[in-house]
Amino acid sequence: MPKMKTHKGTAKRFRVTGSGKIMRGKAYKSHILAKKSQKRKRNFRKETEVSSADNKTIARNLGRR
């Protein structure tokens, strides 16, 4: 059976932690920032874990499992 290929668009957007969680960046941080509070903009910098509903699809695109 051939090897699984990594989906390069997915690879640029997500990363896998040492414990196996898939992390993603947050949305809404690129423009129209004047009306957003400093606290809200600061929280956009942090990564969050991918939802359980999307986990399987993203893992497959990353060439895992």
Image: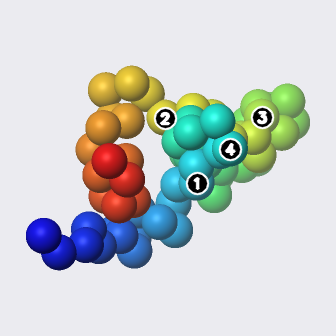
Q: CA distance from mark 2 to mark 4?
A: 15 Å
For the residue carrying disc 4, how many other residues have a C-alpha within 10 Å: few (<14), some (14-19), or many (20+)?
Answer: few
> Horizontal placement of 37 versus 44: left or right?
right
At label 4, the amino acid type is Gly
Q: CA distance from mark 3 to mark 1?
A: 18 Å
> Horizontal placement of 36 versus 53: left or right?
right
Read off the residue under disc 1: 15
Percent across and percent down for residue 37 are 80, 32
Residue farthest along the left direction in this orientation: 1
Does residue 26 show up? Answer: no
Read off the residue under disc 4: 18
Percent across and percent down for residue 29 are 65, 50
At label 2, the amino acid type is Val
Frontmost of labels 2 and 4 is 4
Frontmost of labels 3 and 1 is 1
Q: Nearer the viewer, residue 62 or 36?
A: 62
Q: Are marks 3 and 1 in contact (CB under 8 Å)?
A: no
Q: Are marks 1 and 2 in contact (CB under 8 Å)?
A: no
Q: Secondary structure at mark 1?
A: strand
Name the N-terminal-most of marks 2 and 4: 4
The quarter of the image holding the N terminus is bottom left
Q: Nearer the viewer, residue 50 or 34?
A: 50
Residue at 75 percent of width and 40 percent of height: 46
Read off the residue under disc 3: 43
